[in-house]
Amino acid sequence: MSAKSAITLSRGLAPRRAALHVLAQVRAGRPLDAALDGALRSLDEPDRRLAHEMAAGVFRRQGALDSRLAPLVTRDWGQVPERLQDVLRLGAYQLLELDRVPPHAAVDTSVSLAREEGGPRAGGFVNAVLRRLGALPEPAPRAVAPDAAALAESHSHPLWLVERWLERFGPEETRKLLEWNDRKPRLVLQPAREGLADLERRWQAAGIATEPAPFGAGLMTDRRRPEELPGFAEGAFMVQDPAPALLTWYADLPPDATLYDAAASPGGKTIALGREARMVVAGDVNRLRVRRLADNLRRAGSGHEYAMVADAHRPPLRQVGAVLLDAPCLGTGTFARHPDARARVTAEALDRVQGLQAELLERTSEVVAPGGLLLYSTCSLEPEENERQVERFLARRPGFRREPNETFPPALMSEDGDLSILPQRHEMDGAYAARLRRA
């Protein structure tokens, strides 16, 4: 290898090494966003984008990648060490999905990573597998039948979840939902200290292309780093998908309301609702998350929001006119933005989280004043976490009743009047919310 080639290979290893580190951290339980923040900080912008795309791409396409790689391994795929599996997945993703990466670069950098992990023998193994993969003809496209196993493998989703969605949505909508989850999400920006029209003019003047988000809930851009956009430092805008932004419209808080946001971090809903209410007490049980929440409130808040460490099991205040419980959930409506979450959701986790949600609903409902409003929301698509959870709560607490927002778009509401956003129908993250009025 020439000196020039060696230097090029060394430089090319940095984003691949970072992507491999991200995969390892996420598999150890760290959220993808946090892993990316730590691993990519020292990279320049092109390498940061490549590492991000490779790591997220492996999570989105893992089932399909494994189905291509496993037949090329002489031993059982499950016996390949996990780190070496991820090296192969990263190499295969570049070969199969990234036209801008030359095949030799995908193979050579993967071999170098494998040598770092397991020595020359591991490097030779990865080299052989990826060269076999690169030599294979592209498989003929086939229409994926509405078979749960085929869909789950093709789109890297848990089989049990695909089976549920097929039963609930049918084959066509399920396919659209899975395809949505496999897309790279665009950055969506919401107004904070500047209005939407002012932001649009400012970005147009800077040559930044934007377009309206669905239902007018923000502006979409192909830019990736919000902190580099004009207005970020001054708190002119915040990053937030249209679905949680629409919750503010659906909530319809009176201007004199005091709101307790029981699980507020990172603060997007707090900031939006703070522009509607007189005061927002924003709590979170985790001190580090509260620090992040406070930073976001300082940057983009209106001054009506107050962050504090607080456990929603024991609300830290007396009765108030409005409470928002954005409940812990499986997050099945946000798989496009959090592809790593697919590997963590299980049927057992769904059973467990329902108990936690019910307990938090009980505790937070106790601080809703008579005549006040309880807002229950999730970013899940599963009925057990959403409408059925609300129905069970109303059966236990007859002093509460549903009170839909009559000015909200009917296309985004269920028959019961709850906010109900589905990615395959509305082209945004999935979300659910119910307005519950206390007598």
Image: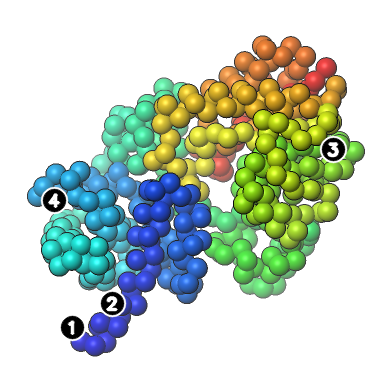
Instruction: Label 4, secondary structure: give it.
Output: loop
Q: Quadrant of the N terminus?
A: bottom left
Instruction: Label 1, secondary structure: give it.
Output: loop
Task: Bin the neighbour count of mark 3 within 10 Å (Cα to Cα): few under 14, some 14-19, many 20 and up.
Answer: many
Instruction: Find residue 9 and name its label.
Output: 2
Measured from the top left, where is residue 297 in percent x and y? 74, 54
Q: Is residue 223 visible?
A: yes
**Which callout, 4 or 2, points at the residue further toward the start of the chain?**
2
Q: Quadrant location of residue 433? A: top right
Which is closer to the viewer, label 4 or label 3?
Answer: 3
At x 80% / y 37%, what residue is drawn? 259
List the residue tagged with mark 3: 258
**CA distance separating discs 4 and 1:** 27 Å
Which is closer to the viewer, label 3 or label 2?
Answer: 3
**CA distance separating discs 1 and 3:** 68 Å
- Looking at the rendered structure, the kind of residue marked 1 is Met
List the residue tagged with mark 4: 73
**CA distance separating discs 4 and 3:** 61 Å
Instruction: Label 2, secondary structure: give it.
Output: helix
Tag 2 and tag 1, C-beta contact below 8 Å: yes
Measured from the top left, where is residue 320 in percent x and y? 84, 31
